[in-house]
Image: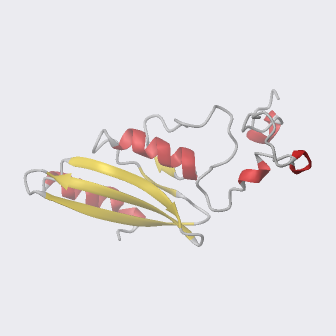
Amino acid sequence: KVPREKLLEFCTFLKEKLLFDHLTCMGGNDLRRSWEVFYHISSYRNRCIIQIRCELPRNDPSVDSLSLLWGGANWHERETYDMYGIVFNNHPKLERVLSPEGTDFFPFRKDFKLLDHWKIDWENKGKRPPPQPLVSSDRRKMGDADG
C-alpha cells in the first residue's frame, strides 16, 4: 500500500530508477468504508510486475493521475472515474468514457441501486418495460443551470 500523497513520487521512482515501463492495468474498488485504486505495473527489462494499492477516504475519492508517467493510464483512469467516481487530479481529460453524457450516478459503487434506474413491471408478470435512459430527467440536479 502506498499513501495517496506519495503515489506520484513513488511511481516516478519506479519508472525512472527501477525501469518499470508499462502500466499493465488499473482499476478501483469500493471497500464500503473507503475507496481503493490498484495498479499493476510491469518492468520488461527486470521481468517483473508490481501491484500497488492506494486507499482513499470515503469523503474524498481523489488521487494524482499517473497518465503523464504512463500514457496507458489515461483510459484506465477515465473508466475508473466513470464507474466509481474516483477523481484523478491533473488528468488531461477526465470525463466519462462508457456512460452516456449526463449520467448522474456511478454504477460500480456498492450503494448504487439498479432498480432505482430500471423498473420491473411486477403487475405484468415481471416483464420489463421498454428501456429508459439511465440519466436524470431533471437537468438541474446535474448542475445544468439552463435545465
* Residue 111 at x, y percent in the picture: 68, 61
- Nearest the camera: 107 or 54? 107
* Residue 116 at x, y percent in the picture: 78, 51
Number of marks in picture: 0
Query: Quadrant of the rendered structure where residue 58 is?
Result: bottom right
Residue 129 falls left or right of residue 15: right
Q: Is residue 110 above or below residue 76?
A: below
- Nearest the camera: 109 or 10? 109
Q: Is residue 142 above or below residue 42?
A: above
**The N terminus sits in image quarter:** bottom left
* Residue 48 at x, y percent in the picture: 15, 60
Residue at the extreme left = 45
Residue at the extreme top = 146
Residue at the extreme right = 123
**The C terminus sits in image quarter:** top right
- Residue at x-position 43% and y-position 54%: 27
Residue at the extreme front = 125
- Nearest the camera: 102 or 111? 111
Identify the colour scheme used: secondary structure
Q: Is residue 95 above or below residue 115?
A: above
* Residue 21 at x, y percent in the picture: 18, 47
Residue 22 falls left or right of residue 133: left
- Residue at x-position 29% and y-position 63%: 51
Q: Is residue 60 above or below residue 119?
A: below
- Residue at x-position 33% and y-position 50%: 25
Residue 10 falls left or right of residue 110: left
Residue 114 falls left or right of residue 93: right
- Residue at x-position 59% and y-position 70%: 32
